[in-house]
Amino acid sequence: MVASEGPWLWIVVGALLVSALAFGLIAETRAANLRRLTRLAEAARRLSEGDAELGTALVDSRNDAIGELTEAFRKMAASVAEREAALRGADRRAWILIDSVASAIVTFDSGGHIESMNRAATKLLGYATQELCGHGLSLLLPEFGELPGRRDAMQTGKADGEFGSAVETNARRSDGVLVPVHLSIAAIRFEGRRFFIAVMTDLTDIRKAEQARDSFVSIVSHELRTPLSAIQGALALVRAEITGELPEKTRSMIAIAHANTERLLRIVNDILDMEKIKAGKIAYDFRAVDLPSLLEQAVEANRIHGAQFDVNIVLAPVPHVCVRADIGRLTQALTNLLSNAIKVSDDGGCVVVDTKVGSQTVRISITDQGPGIAPELQSRIFEDFVQGERSGGRKRSGYGLGLGIARTIVRDHGGTLDFVSQAGRGTTFFLDLPLADAAGDACDSSSATAPGG
């Protein structure tokens, strides 16, 4: 009986040993897989915190599901790391650009607390970035709360880029000195967060230039125009021989002196008008004006000037219509246009003034027989001190202010001034003016002198 049980005992023992070995192998495999999965989970956790280093270093050579998952995760971590590096590079480039901008830039949160500033801001305001972080924007912009629309825009949920219109205000330096600045603020939304960017441009130099200009205008007005006007009046009296008959040679010299004095006075008056226009201080006295009378007076006033250059002015028949105008200022604009046409015309040439009435406007055209305006000058011809040339490249007296002044006067009359020009065929300047209300006052046909004349 014992002998027959021997083989079965060994079979049972062997089976138990095989089972134990199998369970051991399974347990070891499970432990190894658990370690692999644990390492993969740790790499995922670090990646979620922005650290892709462990994920990019994962290596699993086993050709199973966990090995495939590990390799896929490694590639994903490497891709994330590359993108983060690219973003950091882009952020650095963006900040380098912001830091190199000449205007001061300050960022702040929706509560008005300063977060950062560029190098121009530290130079303008005298603060280091760390000194201002967390402080209220009112430390730098004491008038910020009073600026139109600024507080309301910050309290709304909109983020439409720049809000409100750019304004001029004062920024306060670290030493307490107020600096005039041009301020523009934009609201930005990024990654679910809303913040603001304030861009400030220092206006100190511009203010100094304006003061210098005002000083220059004052000097021109009081130190030049007043004595020139007195000299002009005196020469006019002498030329009219009020003080006695003049010898022929003296009469000629007085005429030259009188003409040059008038020219200098026109230059001074145009400079003063230009500054008034830029400052928005030019005044008008609008009324219904008889157009035929106005044009006849303007043409007659410029005939002597035309005769000096052997240029004739022809006034075509003018329809009997009225325009709403300041007689003196519109005459000034017409005089500038006629004077320009005379100066560019050849000796013996002709300047033609024509009119055409539309349903609501009247067009006044002034055509010369000069060389035309060079194509490269046409876009700038109304700018200050831009001059064209007459035939042969010879310039006649002029200083490049009349056309710009004329365009502003016409614009302030509710009209437009433009031109067409062909090389070798002359130029036509045309101004379109609105007709006066027929039901209004009767047309004024009184004469007027152009301002400064």
Image (cartoon, grey):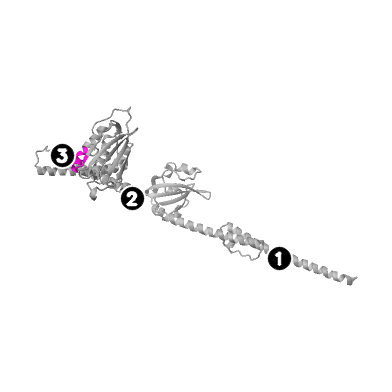
**Of all residues shown, which one is farthest toward the front?**
425
User: At numbered mark 3, what does the secondary structure look like: helix, strand or loop?
Assistant: helix
Asked which quadrant contains residue 50, the reply is: bottom right
The residue at the point 72 percent across, 64 percent down is: 27
Q: Quadrant of the N terminus?
A: bottom right
- Where is residue 62? Give x, y as percent: 65, 65
Position of 167 relative to 287 (above/below): below
Q: Quadrant of the C terminus?
A: top left
Mark 2: few/some/many CA within 10 Å (<14, 14-19, 20+): few
User: At numbered mark 1, what does the secondary structure look like: helix, strand or loop?
Assistant: helix
At label 3, the amino acid type is Ala
> Does the rendering let one see residue 449?
no
Left or right of residue 4, residue 126 in this image: left
- Whether 304 is among the magenta residues is yes
Mark 3: few/some/many CA within 10 Å (<14, 14-19, 20+): some
At label 1, the amino acid type is Glu
> Bounds of the magenta span?
301-312
- Where is residue 194? Give x, y as percent: 50, 48
Between the C-alphas of marks 3 and 2, the distance is: 44 Å
Asked which quadrant contains residue 41, the reply is: bottom right
- Per the image, the residue denoted by label 1 is 28
- Per the image, the residue denoted by label 2 is 205
| CB atoms of marks 3 and 1 within 8 Å | no
- Where is residue 341? Give x, y as percent: 25, 42
> Who is closer to the viewer here, 292 or 65?
292
Q: Earlier in the sequence, mark 3 or mark 1?
A: 1
Q: Earlier in the sequence, mark 2 or mark 1?
A: 1
At label 2, the amino acid type is Asp
